Image (cartoon, rainbow, N blue to C red):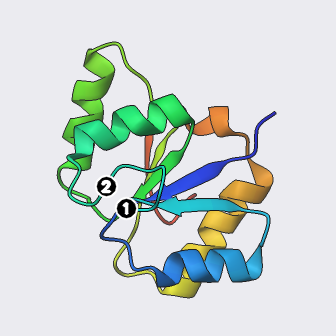
């Protein structure tokens, strides 16, 4: 079983990574634009390919265009470990708690080829 790893979209505030790592130092959370990740301004379809190749779940605030990008990605016979779309009505703390719950209580394959809108379970 592989631990869940997160890739934060470039438009996700860096505070989310800081808070995730502060609460759980063992978590792997990278951000678009980091070394070894897609550079800033990479198109969403290319980010999905990177996530598939590197086994990272994407965390994004892109609520409108990410669902069609995922649909196109899957239609081409490709896959993703999963996508979590942030909810602008949730506080940073609530979002962090949801992501930590996913990380600590789930397996990567549970989110395979799906998009999940935070909060989980609502």
Percent x, y of residue 30: 53, 60
| 93 shown above or below 12 | below
Q: Of the numbered discs in the image, which one, if any, rests on residue 72?
A: none
Measured Cα–Cα span from mark 2 to mark 1: 4 Å
Percent x, y of residue 31: 46, 63
Across the whole image, how many numbered discs are drawn on residues?
A: 2
Residue occupying image coordinates x 75% and y 80%: 23
Residue at the spot of label 1: 33
Task: Please indicate, yes or no, whether residue 96 appears anywhere in the rendered image.
Answer: yes
Work out whether residue 83 or residue 10 is closer to the camera in this orientation and state it: 10
Work out whether residue 94 or residue 55 is closer to the camera in this orientation and state it: 55
| 73 shown above or below 68 | above
Q: Circles 2 and 1: CB distance less than 8 Å?
A: yes
Percent x, y of residue 35: 47, 57
| 101 shown above or below 43 | below
Task: Please indicate, yes or no, whether residue 122 appears anywhere in the rendered image.
Answer: no
Residue occupying image coordinates x 34% and y 13%: 77
Residue at the spot of label 2: 39
When asked about the image quadrant of residue 103, the answer is bottom right
When asked about the image quadrant of residue 110, the answer is top right
| 88 shown above or below 80 | below
């Amino acid at each position: 079983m592989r631990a869940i790893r997160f890739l934060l979209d470039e438009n996700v505030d860096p505070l989310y990574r800081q808070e995730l790592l502060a609460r759980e130092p063992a978590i792997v959370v990278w951000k678009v634009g980091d070394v070894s990740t897609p550079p800033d301004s990479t198109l969403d379809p290319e980010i999905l390919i990177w996530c598939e190749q590197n086994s990272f779940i994407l965390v994004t605030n892109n609520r409108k265009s990410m669902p069609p990008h995922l649909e196109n990605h899957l239609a081409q016979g490709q896959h993703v470990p999963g996508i979590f779309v942030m909810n602008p009505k949730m506080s940073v703390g609530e979002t962090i708690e949801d992501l930590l719950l996913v990380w600590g209580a789930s397996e990567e394959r549970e989110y395979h080829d799906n998009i999940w809108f935070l909060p989980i379970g609502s």
